[in-house]
Image (cartoon, coloured by chain):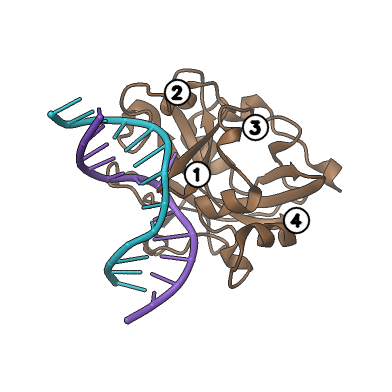
Chain colours: A brown, B purple, C cyan
Amino acid sequence: MSKLYKPLKHSFYLRDTLDVAKNLLGKVLVKKVKNRLLAGKIVETEAYIGDHDPACHAYRKITKRSRTLYQIGGTIYVYFVYGNYYCFNIVTEEEGRGCAVLIRAIEPLEGIEYMKDNRGSVKNIYELTNGPSKLCLAFEIESDLNDKDITGSSFFVSNPLTEKKFDIAVSKRIGINVGKEFMYRFFIKDNPFVTRHKFNKESFLLK
DNA sequence: TATTCGATGTGCT
DNA sequence: GCACATCGAATAC
């Protein structure tokens, strides 16, 4: 069954960042780890839009960290945060733009027991990957993947095996102190694997 | 070289 | 709802 997951091509990421953020919802993140297959449906994303966006790491000049953001769409951007955690992004648009989509939450599909082991004590399956750093722990996403390509055979995004319709909600982004006003967070409405946050109630349905 | 602080998660109240 | 662990990157000096 794992053979059926196939990497989306670069062209998927070489588009407007907001479009990529929306279109990643419902897609499946697939990672092969030690002969196992980890897979989960992307249910929550945020867009970070280069030098127009004060919350984006590429807002200021190019630094050692933000250099990755200026690579071509489809590049993996993993960064270390709060002394303990990682966040996983996929760079979008053409080279030099400094744009990316943060993957904030996933609905586990395959390899769930393995993810549980990676997460230590979690109360229930909904706590497994409902947060950007939680899913990094579950999927073993660390800084060694930074600058790598998301269209390879061992770590990629695929179309789902069975398409389901869903509504997309849009809200403000979580956990930032600048660029707060932008409605750049997207999630699958009423999906229980989405991060629980007050912004969920203040969200709008995307037409 | 020193200082600040963060795209978070966890645990306790 | 709130405090805080934890440390590297960015910025200040």
Image mark for residue A150: 3
For disc 4, the marked residue is A111
User: Few, some or many C-alpha atoms within 10 Å of disc 4 (few <14, some 14-19, many ≥20)?
Assistant: some
Circle nearer the N terminus (1, 3):
1
For disc 1, the marked residue is A87
Q: Is residue A22 visible?
A: yes
Asked if badge 1 and badge 3 are on a common chain, one would say yes
Amino acid under disc 2: Arg
Tell me: A199 left or right of A130.
Answer: left
Label 1 lies in what chain?
A
* Mark 2 secondary-structure assignment: helix
Q: Residue at 58% x, 57% y: name it.
A: A129
**In the image, residue A110 lies at what x, y percent?**
75, 55
For disc 2, the marked residue is A67
User: Few, some or many C-alpha atoms within 10 Å of disc 2 (few <14, some 14-19, many ≥20)?
Assistant: some
Circle nearer the N terminus (1, 4):
1
* Mark 4 secondary-structure assignment: loop
Circle nearer the N terminus (3, 2):
2
Label 4 lies in what chain?
A
Q: In front: mark 3 or mark 2?
A: 2
* Mark 3 secondary-structure assignment: loop
Task: Name above or below for residue A112 compared with residue A17.
Answer: below
Q: CA distance from mark 4 to mark 3?
A: 19 Å
